[in-house]
Image (tube, rainbow, N blue to C red):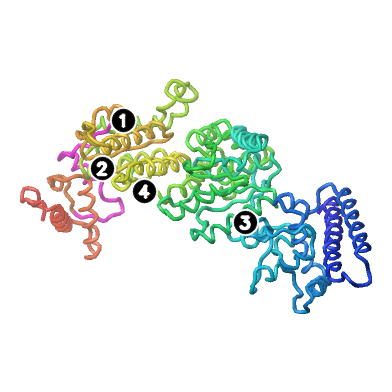
Amino acid sequence: MSAAANNWLETNQRYLSVALAVVRSELERHAARSQDASDVEKQHRTVQTEQALAETAAAMSVPPAIETLCAVFGLSPFERDLLLLCAGMELDSTFPSVCAAAQGDPSCAYPSFSLALAALPDPHWSAITPGAPLRHWRLIEVGAGSALATSPLRIDEQILHYLTGVSYLDERLAGFVEPLRLSEYPDLVPSHQALAERLASAWQQEEARSAFPVVVVQLCGGEASCKREIALSACRMLGLNLNAISANFIPTIPAELDALIRLCEREAALGMSALLLDCDDLNMSDAARGIAITQLVERTNSPLIVTSQEPLRTRDRPMIVIDVGKPTSDEQREIWESVLGLATSGLNGNVDALVSQYNLSARTIRDACAEVAGCTFPSDTQNPIDPDGLGVVLWDACRMQARPRMSDLAQRIEPAATWDGIVLPEPECQILRDIAVHVRERAKVYEDWGFAAKSASVLGISALFAGASGTGKTMAAEVLANELRLDLYRIDLSQVVSKYIGETEKNLRRVFDAAEEGGAILLFDEADALFGKRSEVKDSHDRYANIEISYLLQRMEAYRGLAILTTNMKSAIDTAFLRRIRFIVHFPFPDATQRGEIWERIFPASTPTDGLDASKLSRLNIAGGNIRNIALNAAFLAANAREDVGMKHLLRAARSEYAKMEKPLTEAEIGGWV
């Protein structure tokens, strides 16, 4: 603690002692009206102590705690003395006996409102009403008694400590509120610093206009750490502390909510702080909590920042919405270079690849570097780091950092398929290779060659994989993920589409916003659940169905990664929608030659086989997915029999697969197998 702080504590303690002496003198004068000292003499002593108060306060650079509290909560002189009366009970051992003497009853060794009305100057009954500051802000507590006026009064413990100069977070808020410290966050990048200045300016303008309540600022976007950094920086500019509370901790019981709001407001006033309401992980389907959050926002008059994925709407409270994105590409590149140091120059363009593929916050970039096991970035040229090896490790570390955002929204598929395993006509294979080229060279074409400036809203790479079930659509997506070393997530559109108007777009927004960080490949399965022949708009549901499709295509076009739609019925998709998709890959039902190729590649090299005949197996008129099922089932049958996989095992597995498909297995297909 600094010398100035120590000096203030000592002076504040002296001031409080003198202020308590003034109140004690009032009690003593009331108790001893007819005793040895005259009222004039006692009044003279009170004037002397009042002068001592004024002299002590004048010597302090920061006002005494009691005077700050009175100014913040608008206490009248009588209310101030009543609060000091309650504080004296805890800080001065003579107060109980003085209270008992003043009330003429040894059993009444405690302050009460009737005592205050009789002994303290300028009394008014309104001071004890629930809406008056002392009780509204929970500065005092009224104990049990037969009548309000004679009930014992007690000062709130946190207020008592505040008066003595000891400031801390109210323990009743400890389970809800988290104090944020700017030292925990690095300096902001320029684009975020500009947003922090905009936030601070908005509150400064409100203060200049004496606006009340202060406008609520909403920081919207998917990166929680960026929003907190911006909020902290803005508060630092204004000399405010910042406390955060999760929306999931907000009580839904009205009485508990009311108590929380008052304590938060009191904390903000005494601690010169703003409140950050974190709604990033809010479950929007919890109606009761939504109502509680709306009430908290509308009833909180102190500086309030709301962080959320999407803007929250309230009926009466003025709000400013600020969209918060990740640092720009140039800013991310500077962060990488700052963290990597001299290692950057030897990475042979790997930093540019990281910036192009991953859209990361400053904190995530630092975490990715810290995650690289045993990786150090030397300050000299001794022991140079292998640039290719470091680039690969950093790439994978970025992938791992981005995964948690998607874990609750989509199914991650571990890509096992490679180019050698996929069987398609050459034209379709070439389209898949072209897709990989577009993803890999996206940054060069759009940013370095300037195409982004000509088509800023269509920077994404979209593809439609069309074909019957089992023809290899998901396998092709795995091949691309393996080739590009990217994560692959499957999103079942039949589960995303909602019957409630507007909910489908919200579900899709959450997926795309979360995926933007890692540039993962998004595989939207069952597109038929959303797409269809665009019919005449006959009602609101028809209109909103088209809005949902347009929103999905819009997000795919803007997505910085690869988004793939799969469909079993391409003919059912309106051509107006198809024109907005960059690549369309047809997955035909395999002919006998292609089926033979699939059979030749289906078993891993380590699988023991005996007498398998791909030409005979290719007579099964089934798709690749069914071939994989039969091969796998046959492998289990052979393993159980302690035999190599042979035609008899495949025959039994084929019969099982055809029964599952409810399709007859003809002699023409299996003749001569065994």
Residue extending furthest toward the front = 34
Distance of mark 2 from mark 3, alpha carbons? 57 Å
Name the side, left or right, on which 495 lies relative to 649.
right
Among the two numbered marks 2 and 3 on one chain, the one whose residue lies closer to the N terminus: 3
Q: Are marks 4 and 3 in contact (CB under 8 Å)?
A: no
What residue would you read off at disc 1? 583
Label 4 sits on a secondary structure element that is strand
Residue in the foreground of this view, choosing between 278 and 360? 278
Report whether residue 368 is seen.
no
Which of pointers 2 and 3 indicates the residue nearer the eye?
Answer: 3
> Which residue is tagged 3?
131
Disc 1 versus disc 3: distance between alpha carbons? 67 Å
Pick the quarter of the image with the N terminus.
bottom right
| Amino acid type, callout 3 | Gly
Residues under numbered marks 2 and 3 in contact, where contact means CB atoms less than 8 Å apart: no
Foreground tag (4 vs 3): 3
Q: Which comes before the other along the chain, label 4 or label 2? A: 4
Residue lying at 53% horizontally and 61% vertically, measured from the top left: 255
The residues colored magenta run: 583-610
Q: CA distance from mark 1 to mark 2?
A: 20 Å
- Is the residue 43 above or below the residue 497 in the image? below
Q: Earlier in the sequence, mark 1 or mark 2?
A: 2
Q: Amino acid at mark 1?
A: Phe
**Marks 4/2: CA–CA distance:** 21 Å
Name the residue: 21% across, 31% down. Answer: 536
Task: Please identify the quarter of the rendering in which residue 471 is found.
Answer: top left
Q: Which residue is mark 2?
A: 529
x then y, percent, for residue 452: 45, 24
Residue 598 sits inside the magenta stretch: yes
**Earlier-in-chain disc, 4 versus 1:** 4
Q: In the image as oriented, which residue stretches furthest toward the bottom?
A: 107
**Residue labelled with disc 4:** 413
